[in-house]
Image: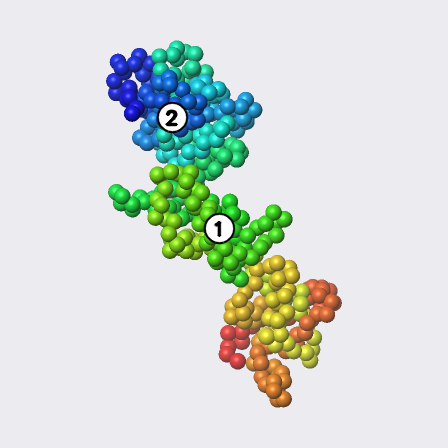
């Protein structure tokens, strides 16, 4: 059982000194090394612990190795303007205060970040002057501004930055119920697992070490998400809402992943315009059908990795693009054979596919420059 000393400073003279150093209303207790969030060698000696987290907003970063201490200070100059102590097992402990603390604990053998829990400050009854490294009040900062590329602590800082935008990681729906914040969890999972979503193909992909994309089935996605979320839950301890691990909830989160992990697509209208310029040209007496153009459009888009329209949208956009480039209207009387007879198809007269793939806007097509865009024609909006 921890012995609270903050509200009763007479119980231990060090309590008054600790409060002066912190400059924060943090609760201080006397406990054992087993109570500390930051790892300590087992010892029978009582230890003074500071309570990090709500409501004081106190948090602590303990770093053992000098190179990593230097790297943290270089990335965060505010580290030299806060209260710093010598760690009980070596290294330094940087203390910060933040009222809107959304960070997570990240505990390793050499670097530990505690935003919620008990952090060792000093051995009970020891000379506190020997424990203080930098005598300043705890700096009040926005924790989402802390930057450091340490692989373990970077994870905690990342959540802090995301929580500043999307809200707390665990959203309360009542006095006893909390749920995961989809905006944070799904972004973290997709980034950690390398998951991407192709909205055109309506498929998930996973980025492998070679940089290529590997198809990921819905079942494989759910299995990967479940494993990642279980590991994440273990690190969060009792704070994690374990009901969120249900299959129905995982499927709901997978739908949200589609939005946050979607593969950026180039402007399909611009891509269609480039395709038409590259693939078609004016040729009197010739004609092409919309179906023939689409049959060439699909492999062109795949080969050049450009955004493309689905067929229904393609057929609506194509007449305007061709009209603007060539001044040619779509027709419904392009004749093509079908089952030993000719049938009428939608298409365009006076156009043909370029065999060489050169740009239709080159100098050899003098007729193009003489034709105004079809959108400027008074008959453009008239029905055929």
Picture residue at 32% right of the left edge, 45% below the top: 178
Marks 1,2: beta carbons within 8 A:
no
> In screen coordinates, is 88 left or right of 5?
right
Residue 89: x percent and y percent? 46, 20
The disc placed on residue 366 is none
Read off the residue under disc 1. 224
Read off the residue under disc 2. 34
C-alpha separation, residue under disc 1 versus residue under disc 2:
34 Å
Residue 316: x percent and y percent? 52, 70
Closer to the camera in the image, 139 or 274: 139
Picture residue at 41% right of the left edge, 42% below the top: 233
Residue 259: x percent and y percent? 46, 54
Closer to the camera in the image, 167 or 108: 108
Q: Residue furthest bottom?
A: 341
Residue 291 visible from this viewpoint: yes
Closer to the camera in the image, 62 or 326: 62
| Above/below status of 169 relative to 117 | below
Picture residue at 70% right of the left edge, 75% below the top: 283
């Amino acid at each position: 059982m921890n012995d609270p000393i903050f509200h009763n400073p007479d119980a231990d003279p060090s309590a008054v000194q600790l409060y002066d150093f912190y400059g924060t209303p943090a609760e201080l207790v006397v406990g054992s090394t087993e109570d500390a969030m930051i790892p300590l060698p087992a010892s029978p000696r009582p230890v003074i612990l500071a309570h990090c987290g709500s409501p004081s907003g106190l948090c602590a970063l303990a770093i053992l190795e000098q190179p990593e201490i230097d790297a943290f200070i270089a990335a965060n100059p505010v580290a030299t303007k806060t209260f710093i102590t010598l760690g009980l097992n070596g290294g330094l402990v940087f203390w910060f205060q933040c009222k809107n603390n959304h960070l997570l604990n990240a505990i390793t053998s050499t670097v530990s970040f505690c935003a919620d829990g008990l952090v060792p400050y000093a051995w009970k009854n020891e000379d506190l002057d020997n424990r203080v490294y930098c005598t300043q009040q705890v700096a009040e900062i926005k924790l989402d501004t802390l930057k450091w590329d340490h692989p373990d602590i970077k994870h905690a800082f990342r959540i802090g930055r995301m929580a500043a935008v999307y809200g707390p990681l665990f959203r309360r729906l009542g006095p006893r119920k909390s749920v995961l914040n989809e905006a944070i969890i799904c972004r973290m999972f997709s980034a950690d697992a390398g998951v991407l979503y192709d909205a055109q193909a309506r498929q998930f992909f996973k980025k492998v070490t070679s940089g290529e994309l590997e198809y990921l089935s819905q079942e494989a996605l759910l299995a990967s998400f479940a494993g990642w979320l279980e590991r994440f839950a273990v690190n969060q301890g009792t704070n994690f809402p374990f009901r969120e691990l249900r299959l129905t909830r995982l499927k709901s989160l997978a739908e949200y992943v589609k939005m946050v992990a979607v593969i950026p697509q180039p402007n399909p209208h611009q891509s269609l315009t480039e395709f038409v310029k590259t693939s078609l040209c004016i040729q009197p007496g010739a004609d092409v059908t919309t179906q023939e153009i689409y049959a060439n459009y699909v492999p062109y888009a795949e080969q050049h990795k450009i955004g493309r329209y689905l067929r229904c949208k393609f057929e609506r956009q194509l007449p305007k693009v061709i009209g603007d480039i060539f001044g040619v209207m779509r027709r419904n009387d392009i004749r093509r054979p079908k089952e030993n007879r000719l049938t009428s198809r939608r298409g365009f007269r006076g156009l043909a596919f370029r065999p060489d793939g050169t740009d239709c806007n080159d100098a050899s097509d003098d007729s193009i420059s003489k034709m105004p865009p079809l959108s400027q024609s008074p008959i453009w909006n008239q029905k055929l």
